[in-house]
Image: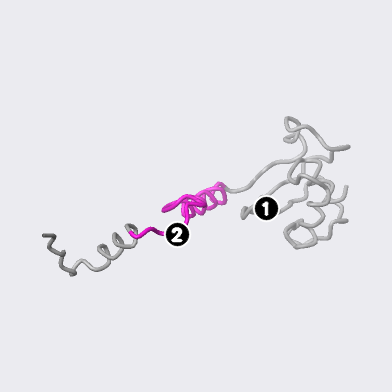
Amino acid sequence: MRVDKYLWCIRYQKTRNISTQACKKGAVRVNGDIVKPSREVYPGDSISLRKNQITYQIEVLDIPESRVGAKLVDIYRKDVTPKEAFETNEMLEYAKTYYRKKGVGRPTKKDRRDLEDFTDPEKPESDAL
């Protein structure tokens, strides 16, 4: 079975076209080699797939006849992706949302003043009368 069709059949890609594009971009490797979408995969092959900043490691156990249901995917592949890959992605997501939620906008005057007070502690406080 072609590698692009295999990735679609075991539900790693939503469509065959997306799977084909991933192969053409070099995001798919079979046994360590960058492959074209037409490369045949066989039981025992190791597939490496880069998707959403995570490099998935898959071992081919069997070849499905056609696209399979989500509950049956484990019959055809073994996911050997290290947990560190998911933890790294989780830390990236946390770093993005640490200070401000997406779409909130640029810092306010109060934010700027708080930053100035934090970065310049020697600055004397103004006496309010």
Q: Is 102 on the left or on the right of 113, as rendered?
A: right
Q: Residue at x 62, y 47 (%)?
A: 81
- The quadrant in which the C terminus is found is bottom left
The 10 Å Cα crowd at callout 1, few under 14, some 14 to 19, many 20 or more, is few
Number of the label disc, if any, that sits on residue 38: none
Q: Horizontal and vertical percent for residue 76?
A: 77, 38
Kindly state the secondary structure of the residue where label 1 is placed. strand
Q: Horizontal and vertical percent for residue 65?
A: 88, 37
Q: Is 81 on the left or on the right of 96, as rendered?
A: right
Q: Amino acid at mark 1?
A: Lys
Q: Nearer the viewer, residue 128 or 11?
A: 128
| Residue at the spot of label 2 | 106
Q: Nearer the viewer, residue 61 or 64?
A: 64
- Quadrant of residue 127 within the rendered picture: bottom left
Choose mark 2 or mark 1, whichever is in front: 2
Number of the label disc, if any, that sits on residue 51: 1
Q: Amino acid at mark 2?
A: Arg
Q: Residue at x 24, y 68 (%)?
A: 120
Please say whether residue 89 is one of the residues in the magenta stretch. Answer: yes
> Considering only order in the chain, which callout, 1 or 2, is on the residue closer to the N terminus?
1
Residues shaded magenta: 83-109
Q: Residue at x 15, y 67 (%)?
A: 124
Q: Residue at x 16, y 64 (%)?
A: 125
